[in-house]
Amino acid sequence: MTVSKKPVLEVRGLTKNYKSTTAVDSVSFEVRSNEIVGLLGPNGAGKTTTINMILGVLEPTHGSIRIEGRDVALERSEALERTNFAAVYSPLPGNLTVSQNLRIFGLLYNVPDSEKRIEQLLEEFELKQFRNTRCGVLSSGEQTRVSLAKATINRPHLLLLDEPTASLDPSTAQSIREKIKEYAAQGEGGVLWTSHNMYEVTDVCDRVLFLSHGKILLQGDPKTLPGEYKKKNLEELFIMVAREPLLLESM
């Protein structure tokens, strides 16, 4: 994949404090067009807090977030209309059908010719047979496909994916990964992806950022970064970040 230099997301000095606890500590990074960046780290590292600040759900204590040059703090609507999101812990309303959910989000994002776009997504994510099925009765894999259809309905230039393939069987997860790689390769979109599946991250991501206790400890190409720290693969490096972050800080 050829990665352009155009930044879709610019995060500078991002910090989130909760009284005496610092959940995110002066984090800075970019996501560029046609790039998939993995945001990695153990539970409690600050990944979801960072994503929630990018989405405008949480207000940063310090720092700035720009989406295609628009400051989320000052131009929230303009910035977020170019953004979308999917996560296993944020399912779509289960009492609505697949089509109803997509129609509502098409209206929320003011998608032009939304009915045509919905038909495209039903075809792309193999959901045609479920168009009139309530989301709450779908399997986890089917619900994930609906969530990704929703997340791409407005053709976002910044797509945020928090554990998008968690609990999926290997075949379904592979299919989802291929769809996201295709999405990033086309148009001008960039993707920020969190996952605990290091095989998946190595396969999908152009670049990874390792968070520990709210700080970025290291970053680089997931295929070559482990070797720089004398590790065989990304999973071994992840374990080192989780268990021995102070050792990495001193290297």
Image: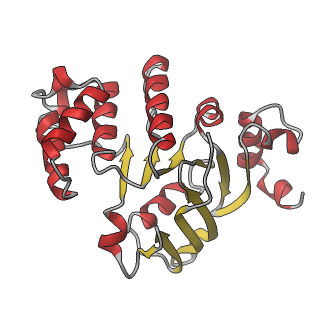
Q: Is residue 158 left or right of residue 14?
A: left
Residue, x 27% and y 35% (percent of image)?
146
Give the residue displayed 46% in from the left and 52% down from the top: 188
Q: Is residue 128 left or right of residue 202?
A: left
User: Is residue 217 shown above or below 163?
Assistant: below
Horizontal and vertical percent position of residue 167: 43, 28
Q: Nearer the viewer, residue 27 or 119?
A: 119
Report the side of 14 relative to 148 (left or right). right
User: In the rendering, at what x and y percent does residue 118 appear?
Assistant: 19, 38
Name the colour scheme: secondary structure
Indicate the quadrant containing the C terminus: top left, top right, bottom left or bottom right: bottom right
Q: Is residue 119 left or right of residue 213?
A: left
Residue 213 x %, y %: 65, 61
Q: Quadrant of the N terminus?
A: top right
Q: Is residue 103 above or below residue 108?
A: above
Report the number of discs: 0
Q: Residue at left 33%, top 46%?
A: 151
- Give the image quarter of residue 72: bottom left
Residue located 29% across and 71% down the image: 77
Q: Quadrant of residue 240?
A: top right
Instruction: From this view, report whether residue 38 is shown above or below residue 132.
Output: below
Which residue is nearer to you in this view: 10 or 194? 10
